[in-house]
Image (cartoon, helix red, strand yellow):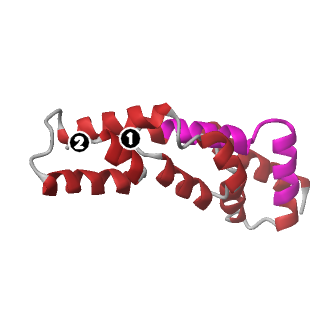
Amino acid sequence: MSGAEISKLERAALRLLVAREHSRWELRRKLNAHAAQPEHIERLLDRLEEQGVQSDLRFTQEYIAARGRRGFGPIRIAVELNERGIAAALVEACLDPDGARWEQILLETAKSKFGGNPPEGYEDWARRARFLEYRGFTTASIRRLLPR
């Protein structure tokens, strides 16, 4: 691979990282579209990580914060991070699924979706609980926090 091709690959990686944080796995997948040799991509990713330009830790922290602001819970976020190539140990270290902030996010999400009114019977409560489970909140926290 020539120096110009490596430079083009590096510019593509930097363009992606300027737009938003990317996990190493996401960058690798996107850079493969440039038909570069895998060893060149790995060397570039190593260099970007050493320089602090790409960081799975930073990506994970920003992803958790952004998805939490959008009303998603820790279970769903953990699955999404796993799909983006983030190691389970890093997800566990950053997520804190039992933290008080998830309770607040659950309550805000429920209020945003269903208003401030309590459920009208068990079927309505179950419908709300299913929605919150789909959003990634634990059954225990839903039972504890969702008014009946």
Tag 1: residue type? Gly
Total of numbered circles in the picture? 2
Quarter of the picture containing the C terminus is top left
Name the residue: 85% across, 36% down: 51
Looking at the image, the residue that sits furthest to the left is: 120
Which stretch is magenta? 41-66
Give the main secondary structure, helix, strand or loop, of the magenta stretch. Answer: helix
Classify residue 15 by image quadrant.
Answer: top right
Q: Is residue 78 left or right of residue 130?
A: right
- Number of other residues with Cα within 10 Å of mark 1, as a class: few under 14, some 14 to 19, many 20 or more: many
Name the residue: 43% across, 51% down: 138
Locate residue 105, reporting x and y percent: 39, 35
Observer-nearest residue: 30 or 90? 90
Cα gap from disc 1 to disc 2, whole angstroms: 10 Å
Q: Circle 1 sits on which residue?
A: 71
Tag 2: residue type? Lys
Residue 62 on the magenta segment: yes
Q: Earlier in the sequence, mark 1 or mark 2?
A: 1
Residue 141 on the magenta segment: no
Classify residue 117 by image quadrant.
Answer: top left
Label drawn at residue 102: none
Check disc 2 and report its element: helix, strand or loop: helix
Locate residue 48, reporting x and y percent: 82, 43
Observer-nearest residue: 81 or 32? 81
Quarter of the picture containing the N terminus is bottom right
User: Does the image show residue 75?
Assistant: yes
Check disc 1 and report its element: helix, strand or loop: loop
Label drawn at residue 113: 2
Q: Is residue 21 left or right of residue 128?
A: right
Name the residue: 86% across, 60% down: 40
- Number of other residues with Cα within 10 Å of mark 2, as a class: few under 14, some 14 to 19, many 20 or more: few
Q: Are marks 1 and 2 in contact (CB under 8 Å)?
A: yes
